[in-house]
Amino acid sequence: MNIHEYQAKELFDQFSVPSPKGRVAETAEQAQQIAEELSGQVVIKAQIHAGGRGKGNFKNGFKGGVHLSESAEEIGVIAQQMIGEVLVTHQTGESGKVVNKVMVAQAVDISKEYYLAIVMDRESRSPVIVASTEGGVNIEEVAEKTPEKIIRETIHPLAGLQPYEIRKISSNLGFIGDTAKQFGRLLKALYKLFISCDCSLVEINPLVTTPDGQVLALDAKFGFDDNALYRQPEIEALRDPSEEDPREVAASEFGLNYIGLDGNIACLVNGAGLAMATMDIIKHFGGEPANFLDVGGGATEEQVTNAFKIILGDSNVKGILVNIFGGIMDCDVIANGIVGACKQVDLNIPLVVRLEGNNVEAGKQTLTSSGVNLIAADDLSDAAEKAVQSINV
Amino acid sequence: MAILVQPDTKVLIQGITGGFGAAHAQLSLEYGTQIVAGVTPGKGGQVFESKVPIFDTVDEAMKETGAKVSAIFVPPAFAGDAIMESVDAGMDLIVAITEGIPVADMMRVCSMMGDSRSRLIGPNCPGIVTPGNGPESSGGCRIGIAPGYIHKKGSVGVVSRSGTLTYEAVWQTTLLGLGQSTCVGIGGDPINGTSHLDILKLFNEDPETESIIMIGEIGGSAEEEAAAWAKENCDKPIAAFIAGATAPPGRRMGHAGAIISGGKGTASAKKEALREAGIAVSETPSEMGSTLANIL
Ligand SMILES: Nc1ncnc2c1ncn2[C@@H]1O[C@H](COP(=O)(O)OP(=O)(O)O)[C@@H](O)[C@H]1O
Ligand SMILES: [Mg+2]
């Protein structure tokens, strides 16, 4: 799960990670009012779940998702051009993202921009701190062109962040004196936040030093471990469904795992690995998968019905491939579920069904005698070939 | 010999009184597996299906019954603790079926396991099956949630991150008459106890295993590491399949660990590494068995 920058700033405040004063606005009037309250130069930032906003462009022609201004009135005018408009950045893809809110914050004088992140690293099975003197730019590019400028420090999962590790990172970034002290406090607070909130990623790009000696987080990107949300109700409450694919939101309500893609052959599968493999085999036989859909261990009539409804909500879909390895589940129960679902949703595109596993003969019998117009397949290759053929006639 | 578990292995189930744990404990008993104890805190003294004694703690259950292997069917919030309890009791093998354990918990568990004597398989896995000699492979050791009847005692070792793809490979090798020595689901989470490489090493040492099917998916680099080792050290023919060639980058494909991040962990990079190591890569999930048969 991800959150917005203004929500990240609230977490920063809560955990004493210093960042410029600011608030979120949903209208141009609010934005202008916050700018008046803050006084002096302020920054206005479009709030979307993607980075690269500074260099991004709006579809209405307005340039840049991050602007500085001395005039509260101008902030209002800029907000007007951002709110409700679509912002495209190198992280959003061509379709971009709708900006529903903007954040208005105190602008700071920047001496130097740095990069600082903490990630849950699967290779070392530990939190890893990543830092660089090259901040405010695309960090993947830095890692590729000048890997020596990336500092990585692996933290022991049980011991946690140690003072010597903080000193090491601080010294490698070139901090001395009071700046080093401030950075140390910030990193310690950030690590505490990372662990307390079950984060998978916290990224500050840029972290900045100012001429008057402050160390501040100017931007923030968070990722949270979905498996841990049950014990993070305050984080879960920050979820913004408007940032997610509505089909994925609907699917998760029915215990289905759905990811929309661009193709035209939908698939419905039990098990994540088999669901991926089913997409792959559709492609192998010359088709394009429309989605990933894992119905989990079982496949009840209710689940299949809801899955069909979500699949059919995608107007690109021209055919459906159902691939179930029954395993423990009785294939006849699954077959009845498929037939019931077909009748409920009034299916009018080709449906190919591959059923394997426990009591499969009875299941196939149920499918063929149901009167539902479907194409039975013998195995997975056969099913994928038939699905591709069915939409090409 | 098979690997990890044998038909006479004594198995304990943590969470035997939950709906899911109970259903699969029953199926394992029917398969002929030696389920000798259950553990549910607060239910010590009860008996499961008038056969299996239930204890409050793993320590007690082990001492009373001699169980050496524990299966974890405990809900995600308590699963990390349940694994640690088994490590503390000195179990040889812990098989964590539970899906949805927080990553931070698994990180702590793996770190605490350090050089303890226990091996962890999973979490988020279908478990382990060593098929038996009986009808529909019964009489073997089934730990977890795999359908027993699709197996056949034989010579192929199967290792996989995905449950349903394991069943595909098992069914294909059963239909081909090859059968399986042992099938191990290592799980779909980003942090797991046992890797592809660990299992390849065990299969390589096992006289009953004559060939191997390794099933991987996008995310991480476990398949590449296994391939690099196999190239130098493995004497047995290996066929492999990698799922997720069509998965969009940056998206978690059902399994918490199945994600291409920062351009790393793609199916094509993994297939390339496997081929480079002399492993036969199956182009589709329906040809895992035949790809293996072709190189035997
Ligand atoms: N409060 C601020 N004061 C001054 N400059 C800022 C402030 N916030 C952001 N910036 C500048 O704008 C750039 C882009 O903003 P940032 O929040 O990093 O968005 P993104 O990463 O999405 O482009 C920063 O690298 C920084 O140079
Ligand atoms: Mg930034």
Image (cartoon, rainbow, N blue to C red):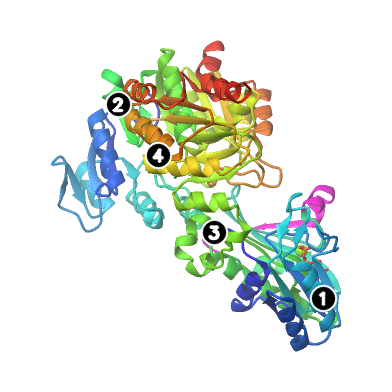
Q: Are marks 1 and 2 on the same chain?
A: no
Can you tell which mark lies on residue A77?
1
The residue indicated by pointer 3 is: A157
* Along the viewing direction, whichever of B142 and A308 lies nearer the viewer: A308
Q: How crowded is mark 2: few (under 14 residues within 10 Å), some or many (20 or more)?
A: many
Q: Are marks 3 and 1 in contact (CB under 8 Å)?
A: no
The residue indicated by pointer 2 is: B140
Residue at disc 3, secondary structure: loop
- Going from N to C along the chain, the mark reached first, 3 or 1, is 1
* Residue occupying the point 76% across, 76% down: A215
Give the amino acid type for the residue marked by disc 2 in the picture.
Answer: Gly
Give the amino acid type for the residue marked by disc 1 in the picture.
Answer: Val
* Along the viewing direction, whichever of A366 and A258 lies nearer the viewer: A366
* Along the viewing direction, whichever of A361 and B85 lies nearer the viewer: A361
The residue indicated by pointer 4 is: A297
Q: Which of marks 2 and 3 is in front?
A: 2
Disc 1/disc 4 C-alpha distance (Å)? 53 Å
Give the amino acid type for the residue marked by disc 4 in the picture.
Answer: Gly
Location of residue B20 by image quarter? top left
Instruction: Look at the image and give the residue range highlighted in magenta.
Output: A140-160
Where does ligand 1 appear, by image quarter?
Answer: bottom right
- Going from N to C along the chain, the mark reached first, 4 or 3, is 3
Q: Are marks 4 and 2 in contact (CB under 8 Å)?
A: no
Disc 2/disc 3 C-alpha distance (Å)? 38 Å
